[in-house]
Image (spheres, rainbow, N blue to C red):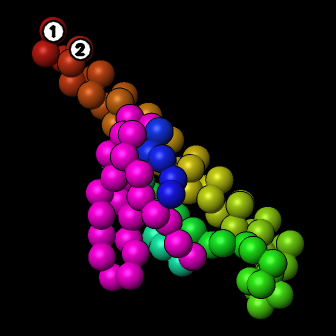
Amino acid sequence: MRLQEGTNPIVVQSEGQRRKVCAQQRAKIMHDDVLELIPGEYFMKYVNMSDERKSSTSVESHDLKKGKRHSEEDSVAAKRNRQVMEDEALARTLQVS
């Protein structure tokens, strides 16, 4: 069982079902479950790396670095888009004033 500690809810997709988990609620998270962070539409897949799964899971370090780089690029793009939206909102506010 994992406790949802943040203020924003998450959605746990497990065994074909989606369950919304709000702050201070608990949900069981299993191998291959998908966690959706809302708002923002960010998805993460939970992978249990216990000893029995390590032998069957082959992950190259360069794949991890590539995934991290893509994740960082996505994060930068999201920040840039958010900044553009905030700047446009400020410009509209200043025009009205």
- Which of the 4 image quarters holds residue 83? top left
Is the residue 22 above or below the residue 56 in the image?
above
Please give the name of the residue rendered at 30% of the width and 69% of the height, measured from the top-left corner.
18
In this rendering, the answer to whether 94 lies above or below 65 is above
Q: Is residue 38 visible?
A: no
Instruction: Give the position of the C terminus as an image quadrant.
Output: top left
Q: Residue at x 77, y 69 (%)?
A: 64
SS state under label 2: helix
* Label 1–label 2 contact, CB within 8 A: yes
Residue 65 position, x and y percent, is: 79, 65
Nearer to the camera, 90 or 32? 32
Q: Which residue is tagged 2?
A: 94
Q: Which residues are magenta?
A: 6-31
Rate crowding at label 2 as few (under 14), some (14 to 19) or many (20 or more) other CA atoms within 10 Å.
few
Residue at the extreme bottom: 56
SS of the residue under disc 1: loop
Q: Is residue 34 above or below residue 22?
A: below
Most extreme residue toward the front is 1
Residue 97 marker: 1
Q: Residue furthest left?
A: 96
Q: Nearer the viewer, residue 44 or 76?
A: 44
Image-based side of 85 in relation to 1, left or right: left
Name the residue furthest top. Answer: 97
